[in-house]
Image: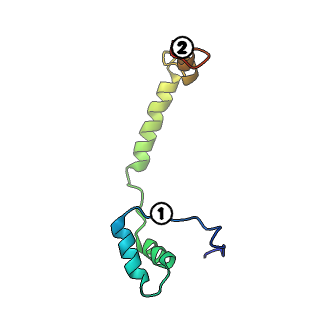
Amino acid sequence: MHSMQTRRQQPSITIRSEKAALLLEQLAASGRSKVSIIEDALERLPIRPDHPLEAERRARIAEVLERLAARPDIPSMKDFDAREYDPRGNLR
């Protein structure tokens, strides 16, 4: 399940919540490693399935983007940049 990596090879985890850091310290006081506590907690979290309407929403967005891309009156970003900025990147 886990590949054996040296501690230096493992990515670090930063906890910015004082409440979470304090709770982790309390749980680790029993001798368990902080990593095992975090891994166990993450494994218990339910993985949220995509909302049933997510695929439909993405399809509608893709359709709108295709229609916009097909319109000749909407400039590409390259055309927009050429119109709005000079070759040195300054606003015209």
Q: Position of residue 66 (x, y in %)?
A: 50, 30
Q: Position of residue 43 (x, y in %)?
A: 46, 74
Q: Quadrant of residue 86?
A: top right
Q: CA distance from mark 1 to mark 2?
A: 44 Å
Residue at 42%, 38% (x, y): give it. Answer: 60
The image shows residue 74, relative to residue 2, as above or below, that is above
Q: Which residue is mark 1?
A: 14
Provide the secondary structure element on which disc 2 rests: helix
Give the quarter of the figure containing the N terminus. bottom right
Give the residue type at disc 2: Arg
Q: Which residue is mark 2?
A: 83
Q: Residues within 10 Å of mark 2 (few under 14, many from 20)?
A: few
Q: Position of residue 22 (x, y in %)?
A: 36, 73
Residue at 58%, 22% (x, y): give it. Answer: 78
Mark closer to the chain start, 1 or 2: 1
The tally of labels here is 2
58 and 28: which one is in front? 28
User: Which of labels 1 and 2 is toward the front?
Assistant: 1
The image shows residue 42, relative to residue 55, as above or below, that is below
Give the residue type at disc 1: Thr
Residue at 46%, 73% (x, y): give it. Answer: 38
Which numbered tag is attached to residue 43? none
Residue at 55%, 20% (x, y): give it. Answer: 81
